[in-house]
Image (tube, rainbow, N blue to C red):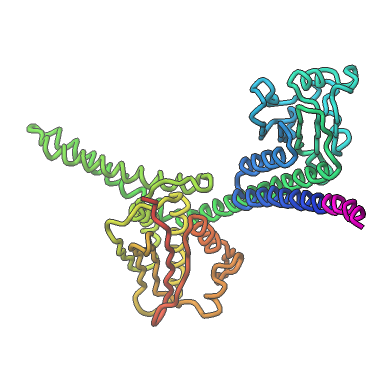
Amino acid sequence: MNQLNTGEVPEAGQVVSDLQNELAEVFRQRAAISAVLRAIASSPHDLQPIFDTIVENARGLFGADMGVFRLVEEAGFRLVAHAVSPSVSDDALPPKLVERGALHGSFYDRLIESKSPLHVPDVATLDPNCAGVALASIIQRGLRTLLYVPMLRKGELVGSLALARRRVEHFTEKEIELLTDFAAQATIALEIVRHERQLREAQMELAHANRVATLGQLTASITHEVKQPITSMIINAQAALRFLERQSPSLERARRVLVQIGEDGMRAGGIVDGIHALFKKTPSRNNEYLDINNAIQGVIELTRGEVLKSGALMQTDLAQGLPLIECDRVQFQQVILNLIMNAIEAMSAVDDGTRELLISTREAEPNGVLVGVRDSGLGLAPAMLERIFDTFYTTKPSGLGMGLSICRSIVEAHGGRLWVTRQTPRGAFFQFAIPARPE
């Protein structure tokens, strides 16, 4: 009986040990995959942290001495991330680019052809005549066991994830399967970033088109605003000449007039610069530290003529000493421009009473700036309030329903919020808050 028990205990102990090892391996795999997923979630616009995380976790999980991540380009396989163990010297680091056809018989050539994992248990057993220069380079770097896994998108090879061991130790089927999963996650991350970039580019195009369309409506007003300082410059230049052509030249009066000419020239130049910036396709989030009141005044200059033409009274209540905000000046001015033009149009349907437009700023809690544009138009019905910022929703007969949607996207992209409230007895009050720059 004792002999029977003695024989069974090691067998049961071995089973428990195997189960513990297998469970530990599962936990390690889960931790590695979780790290990759966190990297994807926290870096939606930047692939580099995702690639670095995938390579480092794959190398550590499989006990490899080197992990290499490459993307397919027209020139060849471009190195985008790598991870090595402390024992690997700089001489063994992978080349930046493996050119197409440069390494005859390279494993990347085979990967292109097969589009399936390529496992080399021991490079020393390969025929040098088949692998050519590629094999010689790998042996020179001290690598023995290799595993290449393709990254496929709709059947096309877009990159590869490779692991190498300096010792002869083949990769198991389970390891090959898991590395294939890592490569699939990298491909998904590529697709996510690619789609987001396309979306941002489309949004930028729409925002640009919206600015151009709005400025098109302001053409007559802008022309008037530019002609004013130019006309003033001409009149003052003629006056200065008269002061200087007298028998006793009035130098002081001429000097004052020349100063006025300089100020008018700067004003005209500022208007033109503002128009140029709004027409330009500026990159998204071209941020600067902005004096919000100064940026608003620039938009007011462009819209002043349109406000006067509409018969509205425009007032400003701009708080002083506001903190600077970190934002894209052109995008911020586009929001203000849209809100002012919408207010003017909303008041055009009002036949009785004063048409009043108020633009205000104040400090927002806990740390930010609040901007408001209030009109005395007919206001918004409750049903409109719920949908006013929806894409393609418009209350205008000729509207596209893009302006306010773009405005909200811009404000939210800067960490802010845009909303609207009804006013009593009539009118609408659009407000948005943007965080101030960190101290």
Residue 369 in percent (x, y) is at 37, 60
Along the viewing direction, whichever of 390 and 297 lies nearer the viewer? 390
Looking at the image, residue 39 lies above or below residue 240: below
Locate residue 88: give its quadrant.
top right
Rendered residue at 19%/35% (across/down): 241
Residue 206 visible from this viewpoint: yes
Looking at the image, residue 395 lies above or below residue 189: below
- For the image, the number of numbered tags is 0
Residue 194 in percent (x, y) is at 68, 46
Locate residue 240: give its quadrant.
top left
Q: In this view, does 336 lie to the left or right of 47?
A: left
Which quarter of the figure is the N terminus placed in? Answer: bottom right
Along the viewing direction, whichever of 200 and 134 lies nearer the viewer? 134
Residue 32 in percent (x, y) is at 69, 47
Rendered residue at 41%/47% (across/down): 274
Residue 195 visible from this viewpoint: no
Locate residue 74: give its quadrant.
top right
State the residue lying farthest toward the front. Answer: 2
Q: What stretch is highlighted in magenta?
A: 1-14
Rendered residue at 84%/20% (across/down): 104
Along the viewing direction, whichever of 429 and 266 lies nearer the viewer? 429
Looking at the image, residue 304 lies above or below residue 93: below
State the residue lying farthest toward the left. Answer: 248
